[in-house]
Image: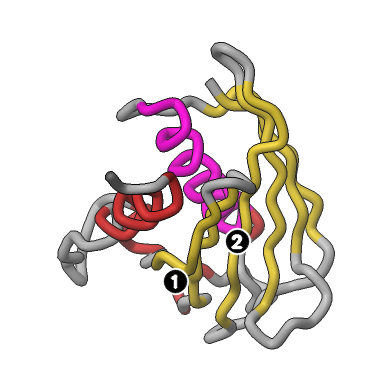
Amino acid sequence: MEDGQAYMDRIMKAAFLGEREEETRYIYDKMRGTFAGCCFTDKELKMEFQVQEWELNPMQTMHGGLITTAVDMTCGLLVRFYKQSVSAATVHLSVDFLRPLRLGEVFTVRAKINRQGRRILFLTAEVVSSDGRQPAATASGTFV
């Protein structure tokens, strides 16, 4: 029988196996997040992204709304796994932007479930560059 970590690894990796078309109407596909790791006992998921040209704002840094989308994607996938559901809804999501992300920069969103009730889950997340510099953003959210 498969242990919790092996099961989580298998399910999360499968979520990223679909082929992505270059032109798609879904923002989740356009952002091209990839599986970067998970921990069953700590209730954590990591997704990796690279800042693309279409995601830049006029200051030539990643638009804050798209950083928020990357956080929401990662948290939502983690919530779906622990709820054992095909859907998750964001009730509240607060993001603090600490530094800009630039074109081509690779970053990881690390989401963690801090508390899980019968219906509501409370998560925190951190957006960190692959170079290990100061986090670009921190977040907290409530999901159902």
Q: Nearer the viewer, residue 37 or 132?
A: 37
Q: Which label belongs to residue 77?
A: none
Q: Main secondary structure of the magenta part?
A: helix
The part of the chain drawn in magenta is 65-84
Question: Label 2 belongs to which residue?
Answer: 109
| Three-letter code, disc 1 | Trp
Q: Residues within 10 Å of mark 1 (few under 14, many from 20)?
A: few
Q: Give the image location of residue 53, x and y in percent.
A: 47, 78
Q: Which mark is residue 54?
A: 1
Question: What is the three-letter code of the residue carrying label 2?
Answer: Val
The image shows residue 129 at horizontal and vertical percentages of: 67, 77
Q: Secondary structure at mark 1?
A: helix
Does the stretch in magenta take in 14?
Answer: no
Residue that appears at 22% across and 58% down: 24
Point 56% across, 71% down: residue: 56
| Residue 8 percent location from the top left of the image | 40, 49
**Rendering coords of residue 26 (x, y %):** 29, 50
Q: Is residue 5 positioned above or below 32 on the image? A: above
* Residue 83 painted magenta: yes
Q: Is residue 103 left or right of residue 125?
A: left
Work out whether 122 lies above or below 51.
above
In the current view of this chain or complex, which residue is farthest to the top? 118
Asked whether 132 or 101 is in front, the reply is 132
Q: Earlier in the sequence, mark 2 or mark 1?
A: 1
Which is nearer the eye, 108 or 6? 6
Q: Secondary structure at mark 2?
A: strand
